[in-house]
Amino acid sequence: MAMSCAPTFRMGFSREDRDTNIRRIGWVCEVLSRNDIVAIAAATSPFREVCDEVRARVGCFVEVFVDVSLETAMKETYS
């Protein structure tokens, strides 16, 4: 499922929007993993707290860090 087709597509880059988006994606991954389905999610979240929150809920959580400016991330998101 593409999260851009889900209710998250109108979200912006505010902290509240990013946290909400990560929580929603985390919930989908949590439900899938509970049912022995591997979930791969790529999301933009510069805030440690919400990542730690999702990590605590999802059994096997692997995080990949990419260092990029906000301007580049926004440009790539809308490309």
Image (cartoon, rainbow, N blue to C red):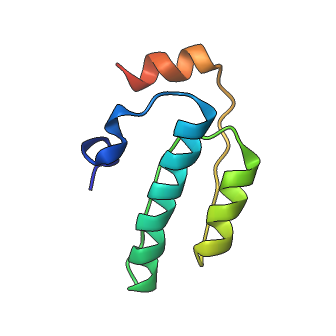
- Residue 36 lies in what quarter of the image? bottom left
Check the image and report above or below for 71 versus 6: above
Q: Is residue 23 left or right of residue 66?
A: left
Check the image and report above or below for 63 versus 45: below
Residue extending furthest toward the front = 16
User: What x and y, as percent, mark residue 75?
Assistant: 46, 16
Residue extending furthest toward the bottom = 35
Work out whether residue 25 or residue 72 is closer to the camera in this orientation and state it. Answer: 25
Q: Is residue 29 left or right of residue 53?
A: left
Residue 60 in view here = yes
Identify which residue is drawn at 65% across, 25% down.
68
Quadrant of the snapshot with the N terminus: bottom left
User: What x and y, as percent, mark residue 5?
Assistant: 24, 44
User: What x and y, as percent, mark residue 39?
Assistant: 42, 66
User: What x and y, as percent, mark residue 13?
Assistant: 53, 27
- Residue 8 lies in what quarter of the image? top left
Residue 44 in view here = no
Identify which residue is drawn at 63% across, 34% down.
15
Quadrant of the snapshot with the C terminus: top left
Q: Report the label total.
A: 0
Identify which residue is drawn at 64% across, 55% down.
63
Q: Is residue 46 left or right of residue 21?
A: right
Check the image and report above or below for 49 versus 69: below
Check the image and report above or below for 17 versus 30: above
Identify which residue is drawn at 55% across, 17% down.
72
